């Protein structure tokens, strides 16, 4: 089956109109969220250096549904094709460095890009993710729940893990809940199966590309321990733990995350 289609969304103006050939940062969201409301505020703090292009996962945000099986490897191949196309069209200018920052499931896509498509990138950021997320049987359970009851059944459980204790910006959280409800049920379910199958733990030592890892100190899904394992296992890894943060780092601390990416993607 062909790789799934993913929408590419400009979060800042195109580099093809930029006389200074800024670097390019491609960002990917977590399960059930949309990249524009998730990363837009963070992107505004990085326009001095990057043009920022977001991707939406299949059936989420602005991407079409994908009802066939999908794997993390296929999602990474799709991102690699996108980068090649952006270079061909001039959106990524000659001389522009290219980076990818992936959150949660997109963090696994980031690892796969570092493993199989490293020649396309100058660095990778893995945000609130892990080489293996949860246990396969739990993803199988979520697959069946969503197929029977829709993504709406996942909203409150997911939201309880998204942000740290004391997070008060309820409008941001409501936007992400809406994104979850609007996510195509079958596409979400198929990505649950993709997460059940993926485990890059034994391949981390192969990664030569600079890998910058960010973890939230209150993240129950992808823990600080997960981040430390990645940082210590890859050949050129560094990590930061964000305080008072859980899983959706771009809405919890957009300015701090922007500063970290600016300082460490080089």
Image (cartoon, grey):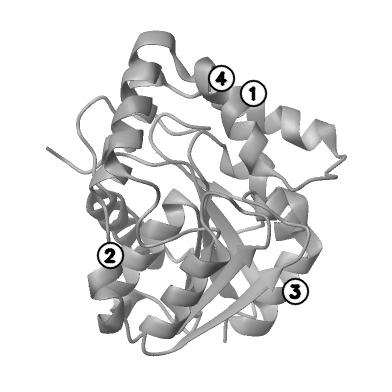
User: Disc 2 designates what residue?
Assistant: 200
Say left or right for 173 vs 146.
right
The circle drawn on residue 181 is 4
Q: Earlier in the sequence, mark 4 or mark 2?
A: 4
Residue under circle 1?
A: 178
The nearer-to-camera label among 1 and 2 is 2
Label 3 belongs to which residue?
259
Is residue 233 depicted above or below 176 in this figure? below
**Quadrant for the N terminus in the image:** top left
Q: Position of residue 228 (x, y in %)?
A: 50, 76
Alpha carbon separation for disc pair 1 and 2: 31 Å
Q: Residue 229 or 180: which is nearer the viewer? A: 229
Q: Which comes sooner in the sequence, label 2 or label 3? A: 2
Task: Name which quarter of the figure residue 13 lies in.
Answer: bottom right
Task: Depth check: give the residue in front, 60 or 81.
Answer: 60
At 82% from the left and 31% from the top, the residue drawn is: 171
């Amino acid at each position: 089956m062909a790789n799934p289609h993913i929408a590419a969304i400009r979060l800042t103006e195109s580099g093809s109109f930029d006389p200074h050939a800024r670097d390019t940062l491609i960002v990917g969201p977590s399960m059930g969220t949309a990249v524009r409301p998730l990363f837009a505020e963070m992107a505004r703090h990085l326009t001095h250096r990057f043009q920022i292009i977001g991707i939406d996962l299949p059936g989420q945000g602005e991407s079409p549904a994908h009802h066939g099986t999908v794997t993390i490897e296929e999602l990474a191949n799709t991102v690699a094709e996108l980068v090649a196309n952006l270079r061909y069209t001039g959106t990524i200018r000659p001389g522009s460095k290219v980076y990818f920052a992936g959150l949660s499931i997109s963090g696994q896509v980031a690892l796969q890009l570092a493993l199989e498509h490293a020649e396309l990138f100058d660095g990778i950021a893995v945000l609130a993710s892990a080489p293996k997320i949860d246990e396969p049987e739990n993803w199988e359970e979520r697959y069946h729940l969503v197929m029977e009851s829709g993504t709406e059944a996942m909203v409150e459980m997911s939201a309880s893990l998204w942000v740290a204790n004391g997070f008060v910006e309820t409008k941001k959280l409501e936007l992400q809940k809406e994104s979850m409800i609007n996510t195509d049920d079958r596409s979400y379910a198929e990505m649950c199966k993709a997460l059940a199958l993926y485990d890059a733990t034994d391949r981390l030592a192969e990664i030569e590309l600079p890998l910058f890892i960010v973890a939230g100190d209150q993240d129950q899904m992808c823990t600080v321990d997960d981040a430390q394992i990645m940082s210590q296992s890859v050949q050129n890894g560094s990590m930061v733990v964000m305080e008072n943060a859980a899983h959706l780092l771009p809405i919890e601390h957009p300015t701090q995350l922007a500063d970290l990416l600016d300082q460490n993607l080089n």
